[in-house]
Image (tube, rainbow, N blue to C red):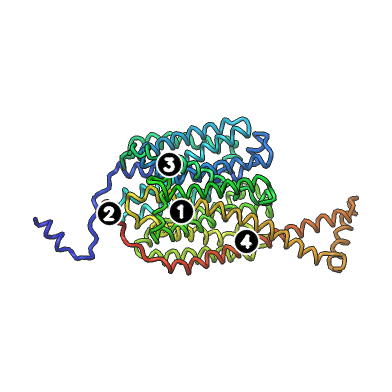
């Protein structure tokens, strides 16, 4: 009675004391986090080692690109589907099957003897692994009370951003120290442990097998065609000169047809394969938009920095990984700070600070030259790593923290899909801009480097004379060298244009942040039916 009176007489603003956390749920959650880390890491782990895989499997340069593309296409189909599968099978069964399948497919990738086998095994790996990512986000916002989000949200934010950032580093080290087979073998022991722990400790929800009778198979097929074709067009478009290629045109037609059928089914059937009603929540819609843009920044910069270091500086995979590791360290050390601030600062202010830091880092990169090295890239990478965590933690809370528990499983799939699609769209735009702007800058620079320019003639004569002294055709060699210098400068200027575009993108988000409402507490489990 005394306890009841004390509770009743507590101040209205006092925060209720949460019951102690179940240790089994904590163990299960961390096992799921490890599974998600492996799945996201494998998106980028092969990116720095494609040449080694190409040599090992005697594949062509066009074929080996599918080692990454097939994974991405399959994963982007599974991510939104995982919410529905979790409701039908339960989180325990879904995650255990995904962890076991991911481990087995990793072993198959390591045993591949030709490029066709590798592409098939990578598609299986991506599809099954994609089911683990949204499950972790859903678990974080259903099994933990709001008071624990200052700890939980930085953990999943760190894994979601750190894994693709350090992927090239880990991949470069493994392929240099051992062989490309270890890019996949490294998953096996952790995968077995995660599978056993998931089956033993996950017990968050119960299966609803009745839903299988209402499963929308046409919706699944149309979603697979829509998202798979979209990912293919975005991945391959620039290298194939977009709509001048027959396959890109066919992919676009398939994408449009798939999209029309998918959205029609999503709003028509009683139990759609993906429930889009989560987007009626304003904060979830804005959070997903921010997640999309963060995907552009996360995957775009993870692509741009290594590309500059390889193309301009001539770094190998290991050297690129060592240079890029700065961003990973910055994320790691900023995660606890972001968690602490998330309980004290308005999340909109945190996001604005993060976007400003991101814009500052990309703006510094607009002064890029051919001589930039580790130390010149140090501050932009620090700003990128710190800002990424300051953005991701509040974005996660804004997007998923206000939804009722029964909506979170499905919404987490959509939320993670936006980040991956942001990365795909961002990479397609970045590659297209690099190609087009490089051509334009080369044309402009070539106009000034001609036989009517005395400085250019003097340079050609001086360099040509040096080559002649060694018995080489000096005129031809000097022209070739000059062409190389112009090409390099045009490439650097195209990088600067892309970084300026990213600066404008992230600066504009600071204004957009002001349009969202401050998140309120999530509704209780019984609400929102």
Question: Which residue corresponds to mark 3?
Answer: 216
Quadrant assignment, res 190: top left
Query: Which numbered dot is residue 498?
Result: 4
Dot 1 or dot 4: first in sequence order is 1
Real-space Cα separation, disc 4 to disc 2, in angstroms? 46 Å
Q: Residue at 65% across / 41% down in the picture?
A: 51
Question: Which residue corresponds to mark 2?
Answer: 527
Dot 1 or dot 2: first in sequence order is 1
Real-space Cα separation, disc 1 to disc 4, in angstroms? 27 Å
For the residue labelled by badge 2, is the local secondary structure a helix, a strand or a loop? Answer: loop
Q: Are marks 2 and 3 in contact (CB under 8 Å)?
A: no
Where does residue 464 sit, x and y in percent of width and height? Answer: 88, 57
Q: Is residue 89 above or below residue 235?
A: above
Q: Is residue 521 left or right of residue 173?
A: left
Q: Is residue 81 left or right of residue 146?
A: right
Quadrant assignment, res 200: top left
Real-space Cα separation, disc 2 to disc 3, in angstroms? 26 Å
Dot 1 or dot 3: first in sequence order is 3
Dot 4 or dot 2: first in sequence order is 4
Q: Are marks 1 and 4 in contact (CB under 8 Å)?
A: no
User: Visible in this render: residue 244?
Assistant: yes
For the residue labelled by badge 1, is the local secondary structure a helix, a strand or a loop? Answer: helix
């Amino acid at each position: 009675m005394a306890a009841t009176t004390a509770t009743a007489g507590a101040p209205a603003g006092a925060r209720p004391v949460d019951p102690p956390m179940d240790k089994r749920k904590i163990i299960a959650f961390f096992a799921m986090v490890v599974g998600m880390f492996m799945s996201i890491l494998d998106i980028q782990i092969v990116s720095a080692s494609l040449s080694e895989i190409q040599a090992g499997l005697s594949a062509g340069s066009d074929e080996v690109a599918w080692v990454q593309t097939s994974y991405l296409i399959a994963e982007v189909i599974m991510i939104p589907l995982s919410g529905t599968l979790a409701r039908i099978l339960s989180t325990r069964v879904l995650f255990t099957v995904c962890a076991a399948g991911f481990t087995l497919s990793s072993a198959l990738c390591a045993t591949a003897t030709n490029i066709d086998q590798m592409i098939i095994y990578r598609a299986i790996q991506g599809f099954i692994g994609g089911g683990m990512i949204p499950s972790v986000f859903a678990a974080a916002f259903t099994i933990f009370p709001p008071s624990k989000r200052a700890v939980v949200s930085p953990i999943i934010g760190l894994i979601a951003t750190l894994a693709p950032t350090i992927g090239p580093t880990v991949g470069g080290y493994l392929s240099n120290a051992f062989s490309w087979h270890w890019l996949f073998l490294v998953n096996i022991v952790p995968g077995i442990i995660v599978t056993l722990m998931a089956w033993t400790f996950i017990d968050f929800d119960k299966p609803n097998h009745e839903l299988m009778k209402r499963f929308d198979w046409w919706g699944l097929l149309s979603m697979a065609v829509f998202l798979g074709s979209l990912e293919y067009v975005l991945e391959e478009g620039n290298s194939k000169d977009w709509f001048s290629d027959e396959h890109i045109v066919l992919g676009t037609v398939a994408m449009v047809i798939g999209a029309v059928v998918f959205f029609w089914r999503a709003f028509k059937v009683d139990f759609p394969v993906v429930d889009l009603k989560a987007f009626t929540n304003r904060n979830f819609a804005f959070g997903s938009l921010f997640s999309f843009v963060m995907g552009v920044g996360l995957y775009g910069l993870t692509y741009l920095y290594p590309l500059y270091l390889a193309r301009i500086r001539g770094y190998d995979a290991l050297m690129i990984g060592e240079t890029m590791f700065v961003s990973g360290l910055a994320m790691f050390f900023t995660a606890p700070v972001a968690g602490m601030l998330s309980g004290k600062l308005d999340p909109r202010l945190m996001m604005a600070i993060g976007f400003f830091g991101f814009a500052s880092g990309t703006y510094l990169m607009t002064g890029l030259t051919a001589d930039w090295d580790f130390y010149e890239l140090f501050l932009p990478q620090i700003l990128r790593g710190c800002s990424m965590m300051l953005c991701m933690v509040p974005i996660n809370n804004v997007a998923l923290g206000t939804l009722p528990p029964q909506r979170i499983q499905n919404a987490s799939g959509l939320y993670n899909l936006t980040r991956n699609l942001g990365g795909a769209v961002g990479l397609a735009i970045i590659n297209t801009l690099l190609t087009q702007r490089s051509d334009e800058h080369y044309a402009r620079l070539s106009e000034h480097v001609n036989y009517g320019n005395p400085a250019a003639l003097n340079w050609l004569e001086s360099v040509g004379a040096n080559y002649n002294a060694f018995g080489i055709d000096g005129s031809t060699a000097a022209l070739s060298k000059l062409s190389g210098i112009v090409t390099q400068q045009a490439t650097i200027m195209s990088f600067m244009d892309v970084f300026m575009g990213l600066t404008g993108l992230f600066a504009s988000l600071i204004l957009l942040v002001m349009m969202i409402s401050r998140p309120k507490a999530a509704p209780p489990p019984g609400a929102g039916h």
